[in-house]
Each structure stands twice: as structure tokens, then as C-alpha cells.
Amino acid sequence: MTTITRPPLPTDKRVRVWFGVHVIADYTGEPAAALRYQAAMSRRFASLRVTIEPATGPLLLGYARRDLYLSDPHIEDMKQELKAIANLEGYTMGPVYVEDPASAPAAFDALIESVNRDQITTVLLPEWRHLALLGDPATIKQQFERVTGAHFLLYEPAP
């Protein structure tokens, strides 16, 4: 029998049945089905802990400068690296705002708007120099954190 799976949607819920610190059953699906599963598992395993939680980790956004990459394929590689780091750190990777020097600070302004609108707490940067197009990176970092309440997570790939 083949099971077809899809990536979790932002609205999906994950139900887990715990035996001590071990998960003995794990279900991810749309909210109504997850609630039915949770109720059934709670009845069946009354003495065990049954939890329900969002199926995805907190949303993480990214920011990078286009002029620091040789080509669009290099930008796509960077986005995939950021996505891998986000997953490793327990986040769900959202959009990476790529700043074009000709239209700066348009992407950074859009990033701030998204962070404030969606209550994002963390933005992933490939390197501090990606903020240098906007001014002194330390100053930009302080202003960003003051205005949004979010912080930067730095990822510097190995050479």
C-alpha cells in the first residue's frame, strides 16, 4: 500500500500520543480531523498524555542582498541553505526578501511590514554584510530590533 503525503499546511494540527517521553502515535492533518483523532486517542489511551499543536514550527523570514551573489541560481542555492537551517532550528521558512541595490530599501521595508503584520520573531541573515547596503549593520540591527521586536539569526555558510 502506498501512502501519499503532503507537506503540512499552516492550518494543520499535529496530534501526538505520549508514553513517558516517547511518541507512540503521531497524526498530522486538517484541524477538524486532528480534533477527532485527539478525542479518539484520549478515549483509547486514557492514562497517556495526548497533545495537539501546530504542525509547523514558527515562521522564519530571510533577508539577503542580490548584489552579493553571482547569479539567480546562486540566490536559489542560498534560499535552500536558509530553508535547511530553518528546518534544523525548528522553524518553517517563509519568504526570503532579496534586496536589489537599485530599489533599496524596498525589500527591507517589505520585510519590516511582514514581521510586524505576522508577528515574526526571527529573521535569518546569510551574513551581517547583507545589512550594509542600508547603513552600518550594527545600527540597522538595533533599529530593526527596536521597531519590530524581532531579532536576526545569523547563518554564515562554510567557504
Image (tube, rainbow, N blue to C red):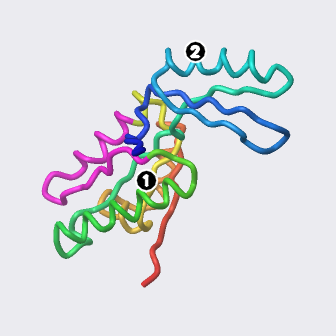
- Check if residue 106 falls in the magenta segment: yes
Q: Which residue is mark 1?
A: 140
Amino acid beneath label 2: Arg
Give neighbour class at mark 2: few <14, some 14-19, many 20+ (Cα, 10 Å). few
Amino acid beneath label 1: Ile
Q: Quadrant of residue 89?
A: bottom right
User: Secondary structure beneath disc 1?
Assistant: helix
Q: Residue at x 40, y 33 (%)?
A: 9
The quarter in which the N terminus is drawn is top left
Q: Quadrant of residue 37?
A: top right
Q: Which residue is mark 2?
A: 36
- Check if residue 35 falls in the magenta segment: no
Residue at mark 2 to residue at mark 1: CA–CA distance: 47 Å
Classify 53 as above or below 97: above
Magenta segment range?
93-114
Q: Residue at x 43, y 31 (%)?
A: 10
User: Secondary structure beneath disc 2?
Assistant: helix
Classify 14 as above or below 57: above
